[in-house]
Image (cartoon, grey):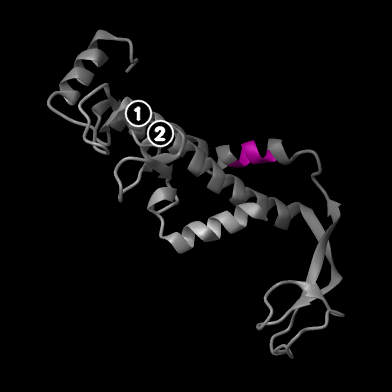
Amino acid sequence: MKRNTKEWKEKRAEFLKGKTCEWCGSSDSLCVHIPRAFSPAKVSSEIYSAAYTRFREIYRQRYQKFDYIPTGKHRHKSHPTWHKASTVHKFEPDHTDLEEQFTEVLLEDSEEGNFKKLYHEWLEETGIKELIEEETKKVREECESLINAIVLCKRCHFSSLRGMNLCPKCRNKYKPVNYETCFDCLPEERKEEFRERQKR
């Protein structure tokens, strides 16, 4: 359903009636927000991404040959970072399960240049293209029904589009979604850690 149609405007007005922003509680400049996780583009992208990863492995097994050359580096259980075998450690490392590092060198690609063509053929053969069409259609219908929609004010909606949400502690400032709180709400020691990191 297009956003400029009379039907959508009526549906939107009905959905917003009597509601406030789910994040900050404001009743000003409300809009209908569908979280990205429920968008057709997100669903399509996730299926394509998983399919692409799978086909890369299939292509690798069917058409490519590799050689593995030692890099001269290894790592220990006690020192999990790769380092040169000649590195002198401050403390004697644990040599149990010593892991040697190898670099991968492509020797042969029997279908070189045909990856894209073979990938699209594989998508058709496995029915993945059809699956994506079915799933995106289902999600589009859910979007139109507003089943997963929430109400946000314009300020919160704009922040969500930038990958941010409202700090649960102060309920005033916004923060990246992967952070627990905004900077101002962090304990003093955590703030110091961030400042030290920025200096470096």
What is the quadrant of the C terminus in the image? bottom right
The residue wearing badge 1 is 155
Residue under the image location 81 percent in, 43 percent down: 112
Residue under the image location 19 percent in, 18 percent down: 13
Q: Secondary structure at mark 2?
A: helix
> Could you tell me if residue 133 is visible in this image?
no
Residue 120 within the segment the image draws in magenta: yes
- Give the camera-side residue of 103 and 67: 103
Categorize mark 1 by other alpha carbons within 10 Å: few (<14), some (14-19), many (20+).
some
What is the quadrant of the N terminus in the image? top left
Residue 86: x and y in percent read 87, 80
Residue 65 within the segment the image draws in magenta: no
The residue wearing badge 2 is 159
Say if 138 sits above or below 69 in the image: above
Say if 83 sits above or below 51 in the image: below
Residue 15: x and y in percent read 18, 25
Residue under the image location 33 percent in, 15 percent down: 3
- The tally of labels here is 2
The answer to whether the residue labelled 1 contacts the one labelled 2, judged by CB atoms less than 8 Å apart, is yes
Amino acid tagged 1: Arg
